[in-house]
Amino acid sequence: MKRFWLIMVVLGLITAFSTTVFAADVKFSGQFYAAGMYLDQTSLKKDATGYSSTAFYFQRLRVRTDFIVSPGLTLVTRFDALERAWGAPRSEADVGLDVDSAGTMAENENIAFDWAYINYKAPIGVFNVGIMNKGTTGTAFGNNIAPAARIKYAYTYGPVFVEVQTSKLAENSYTAKNTTANWTDADRNEYGIQARYSWKGGKAGVNVTYNRDARNRPSANNKKVYWQVVPYAMAKIGPVALEAELGYVTGKERDHDDGTADIKLVGLSGYVDALADFGMFYAGGTFAYVSGDKPDTAKKEGGTLSGGRDWNPCLILFSYYDTRRWVGAITGWDATATGEINNAMKNAFFYQGRVGVRPIADLDIMASLAYAVADKKPSGYLEKDYGLELDLTATYKVTNNLSYMMGVGYLWTGDYFKYNDINNKVDDNYMVINKLTLMF
């Protein structure tokens, strides 16, 4: 009889302690897209051998899962799956992380978890601890979404929001997976504070971060240290939506420990966008700037700042997610990263105008014309003109969660891509894309 009651007590305790788990609520959200692309040339060089057009389909599934353990306490996870071109060769297994993921490119072609963190809404504020999103501030301009190990604390008082954070971006101490390390202080850390004020129809804020990157130690006795200040504002005035952002970086590209002369770091970026929406018709314009580096000075200018991978203003020009990620780098006569046209904007002035019409509630047709020119000519370059691009897109809302987009972009290639010989020939380029997107 004692054994019977002992078993019953044990079962009761198990049930009692498991109640919160049984009562956990689970919420899912995410996105799936499948797209097809045709690109006329994979190089901007005219009549280049070894290059051709390309056409293929690609897709990605992204799922966020919130495990609500109790009111105010949530475990947040997110994964990407089957991120691949249909029928194309798979990536080689490697140890390098994908640029915007906590997994490798090969893992993302199967499944890779990017987030896993605790969100706790305490009476004194909100705590987030774990691997979560990093790289978003204010507007979409300058954003480079990527997971990072972070601790964040945020407090809201009426219209005022304040957040402090620390991020571990690289760890080079001795661990079970890094048994060759025999030094200390070779990590990369970031510390930051953000403040924001919101009002009806708008918000304004500033994000200040301090970044200390000591990964060059001990082989090269220097570290990269800099401050980054990003003020931003967004407002709606009648039918006009306005947003602006400024980025400023100051510090040292190389802060030497052995008496070698340091190399200063400075950078400036700016972004202004206006959109007037009159119901059926709308029109807008964008100006963006990212400082370049003067090749004849020891001071490092630009480099740290960019337009961001998440800001894709055109179908080809400065487009990371639909061209750079899936096609690869599109370059002219300089095949290095300096010669790319389809990556996060750097060293450039950018101007764009756009108009749109909604003939019916579920159909949005937009045309845009953009022009870009380099801020500084890199070493060896003769011209600054990136080119002119005309885009036409149409997006149809099939249901509240499903949309279909078709787009055509034509790039008149600028002489910047002739690189160091004015007699080099460059060719125009165009692409056609269609994308089916499901949001849930």
Image (tube, grey):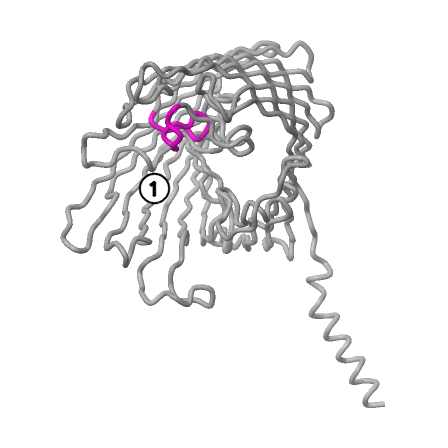
Range drawn in magenta: 333-347
Percent across and percent down for residue 157 are 45, 43
Q: Which residue is mark 1?
A: 208
Who is closer to the viewer here, 412 or 292? 412
Percent across and percent down for residue 146 are 49, 43
| 62 to 330, vertically: above or below | below
| Pointer 1 local density, CA inside 10 Å: few below 14, some 14–19, many at least 20 | some
Residue at image position (28%, 19%) is 382
Residue at image position (35%, 23%) is 348
Who is closer to the viewer here, 111 or 144? 111
**Res. 287 image quadrant:** top left
One can see residue 96 in this view: yes
Who is closer to the viewer here, 92 or 73? 92
One can see residue 352 in this view: no
| 230 to 394, vertically: above or below | below
Q: Look at label 1 and name its amino acid.
A: Val
- Secondary element at image label 1: strand
Percent across and percent down for residue 405 are 65, 21
Percent across and percent down for residue 110 are 64, 47
In the rendered image, which quarter contains the N terminus? bottom right
